[in-house]
Structures are given as structure tokens and as C-alpha cells.
Amino acid sequence: MLSPADLDTLLLTFKVASIATLLMLVLGTPLAWWLTRTHSAWKGIINAVVALPLVLPPTVLGFYLLVLMGPAGAIGKFTTWLGVGTLPFTFPGLVIASVLYSLPFVVQPLQASFSAIGEQPLEAAATLRASPLDTFFSVVVPLAKPGFLTASILGFAHTVGEFGVVLMVGGNIPDKTRVVSVQIYNHVEALEYNEAHWLAGVLLLFSFSVLLVLYTALKSHPVAHPLK
Amino acid sequence: MLTNSSFRPILALALLLLSQASWAVTVLVAVASDFTKPMTEIAAAFEKATGHTAKLSFGSSGKAFAQIQSGAPFDLYLSASEKYPLELEKSGFAVSGSHFVYAIGKLVLWSATPGYVDGQGEILKTGDFKHIALADPSHAPYGVVAVEVMNSLGVLDKLRPLFVMGENISQTFQFVSTGNAELGFVGLAQVIDVNSGKASAPAHAPYLRPVGKIGSGSGWIIPDNLHSPFRQMAVLLKTGAENPAAHALADFLKSPPALAIIEKYGFGLPK
């Protein structure tokens, strides 16, 4: 069965994943919109940078975050200057690392659903004198709803399942940075296979339910494409 | 059609490969990650001395243990603890009675900052650091020993809230080397300056503790009497029972050239 320590790691995981997903939506939406609309020469570069976490093995990414956010790193010097100290081994540090790691899973579905909208609805809104901001919230967001749903669920699920980065940046501190994936790994390493199976089972069941909800919701909200 | 002159080298090469295959064999070794540096050098010496090939797979002892139990094709297993090899012998995955201690692990309290850790470890009692790194004691042998040391010094309860735990000793080293943890318990092999000479007591005075020089930062080589013996054990696996190269490597690990390398990297020698 699950021990209180196991339950703590589950709770902490959902806390990290919820906050990270929220942050990713706040950051990812303008970024994805800009990437969809811009003709800037920077587009290719920014696109590539956003996708880079997919290329780096998580522990490698975690190692570089550890270096960058450490006392000798650029981010670490900046946060120390701000007076908040260094970020590794803290809850905020864990959330920031998760955001960097899972951001492509939020930006890319958003980008895809933004470009699927096309020019016509935006031009129609403009002829009705809607401001760009109004257009975005009244036209783009409703049309891109499936994209937002996919982005949230993928971002959330990916953060829940993340291991290498949190192991590096988190430091495996109980109640503070020890998330469920690390706990399962600890059980396996300590040869506590039974405990590992239980916790992994709960995690799988949870993930399955989340994905099931996603795909059921997507089915009942087909893409309302104006041209179809 | 192949001319005589172009055919001859191919034939020679084929013969050479055939003859190689008849006596030189490959041994696949699972090696605890703390033994990475010495084992790489030992394997090179072994290949030169015997003509066999040693393929090394580095990782945590626990991972290798689980892999071996699931049928991983390793011939020889160098664990960072005694627990896993003995367990494998009991469960029949290793050749019964083939285990032997190949090295004694040495722990160092280390900081990347020069002058931070004193030569007596007083900093553990007086320091106002925010984080102390160690390998996770729930499964990593270095973490178990680190906890024993803090317990012996009576600082365990005070320091526990400051723990940051690496999955293995390499990650623990990264926590400290990047300065994110002010200090931590790492392996001597990770911080020793291999060019500083022998990391052991002189032969005429064996009662002296090893005095391997630490390459960078500052550190305290922890005396053996503060923790239980840190014996690293190897075992011949069932897969390698008939493999002459596996037997040869097990013997080579106990030979003077290998022992010299083991010592150079800051490990104690089996008694």
C-alpha cells in the first residue's frame, strides 16, 4: 500500500505540475501566438530554442540548469542579486525547471491550433472594428479551445512524469522537492519493488484518467473551423 | 575477378580474425559508477596484458543488480557494496563462493570552495551552510556511510533538514562542484589529484591514515573509524561462469598492477 511519504510525493507532484502548467499557459500563449503570426527572422531561432528541451536528455538539461542557477551561474547571480538566493533545491526552482522542460508540449499544440484558424476570422473581426486584444480573446481563444486543452493536459502530464530534471535540480528533499517519479525510482533502487509497483500503479491510473478525460472532451468539442 | 594480390590481404585479415576469436574473448562488466576512473584504466591494462577485451557498463549498483536479476548478459559485477553480490549468490544469479572484495571505499567531506572544509570536519558542528549533499542513503552505499559518519559525530539530527540527496555519488558530486550545495560527502576517487602520488600510508608506517591529496576545493578525508567498513565487492555471474576472460579479469583485479591503480584513485586495498 501507499505510505504517508508516498502520498506526500503525489501531492507535491500535483502541486508542481499545476503551478507549472499555469505558468506555461501564461508564457506559452503569447509566445505561440507571436510564433504563429510573425514574419520575423527570429521566428526560426525561437522555434528551435523552444524545442531544444526535447533534444537534450533530461539529466543533461538538469545539469546545465544546476550550473546556470547555481551561485556561479548567470541565473544564480541574478537571483542572488534579487535577494532570493539560488534556486536549486527549492520549490520555485523545481517549478521553473519544469516549465523550461515541458514548455514545448504547451507551445506546439497552441501554435498548431492558432495556425489552423487562418486569416479569415481575424480579418472578419478587424472589419467589425475589434481590437487585436478583443479579437484574440473573443475569436482566437474559443476557436483554439482544443489546442488549449491539449496543451494543458500534455504540459501537466509531462511535468508529472518528469524525472531527470527534477532529480538534478530538486535534490530529492522530502516534502520539498521529492516528487512521485523520484520516489518510485528510490523504491526500485532500494529493492522495495512492492512499494514501487503500488505507487507506479496509482500514477498510471491517474495518467490514464487524465488522458481519457482529454480525449473525451476533445471529441465533444470538435474544432469549430469557420471554413468547414 | 579478384587478383591474387588483392585477395591475399583479405585472406590474411580473415585468418587473423579467426585466430583472434579462438583465444581472445570479451568480458562484459557491470561497474559501480564510483569505480569509473580506476576501472577504465584497469581494463586498458587488462586488455594489454591478456589480449582479452573488457566492455564496461557504468551505473549505480542497484540498477545493475536489478538488470542482472532480469537476465542482463553481464559476466562480472563490481558493486559499490557487499549487499548486492551476496544477494546474487544466494539467488543463484552469481557463481557461488566467487565474491571478493576488490577495494575499500573512501569518503570525503568536500567543498568546491578552497579553505571551506577544515582538516577535522569541525565545519559540520559549526558551519552555517544551507545545504549538505550526500548520496541517497536509502539505496546508495556512499549515502549509508555518510549518515553513519554524521551519526558518529553527533550531528545527524542537526544536519538532516539540510540534506540534498543525489541519486548516486556522481550526482552528489555535481551538487557540490556547481556550488549549489556548499559541501557534501563524495568519494575520494572523485576529488583526488591522481598526480599527487600515492594515496596511502607509507609501507613502514601502516598505522598512518591514507593521505591522498585533494585536487581542488577543500576536503576532509574521513577516518575509517567513524563508519562501518566500506567494502566494495565483486562477483562472477552465472553468464560469465564459462568465460575465460571473466575469470582472467577477476584474477587481474587482485594483481599488483590493478591494485596500484585502485590505490592511485583513492581507494583502500582489500585486506
Image (spheres, grey):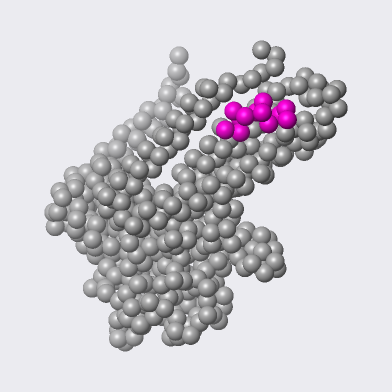
Q: Nearer the viewer, residue A147 or B74?
A: A147
Task: Count the numbered circles shown.
Answer: 0
Q: Is residue A21 visible?
A: yes
Q: Position of residue A87 (x, y in %)?
A: 59, 62
Q: Position of residue A12 (x, y in %)?
A: 46, 54
Image quadrant containing the C terminus of chain B? bottom left
Helix, strand or loop: magenta stretch = helix
Residue at (42% x, 67% y) in the render: B134
Q: Which residues are magenta?
A: A138-149
Residue B3 forms part of the magenta stretch = no
Residue at (80% x, 21% y) in the render: A124
Q: Nearer the viewer, residue B59 or A210?
A: A210
Residue A139 forms part of the magenta stretch = yes
Q: Is residue B192 visible?
A: no
Q: Nearer the viewer, residue A53 or B56?
A: A53
Residue at (66% x, 18% y) in the render: A225
Q: Position of residue A9 (x, y in %)?
A: 41, 54
**From what the image shows, is residue B44 above or below residue A136?**
below
Q: Position of residue B204 (x, y in %)?
A: 31, 86
**From what the image shows, is residue A210 above or below residue A192?**
above
B175 on left or right of A199: right
Image quadrant containing the N terminus of chain B? top left
Residue at (27% x, 53% y) in the render: A192
**From what the image shows, is residue B7 above or below residue B137?**
above
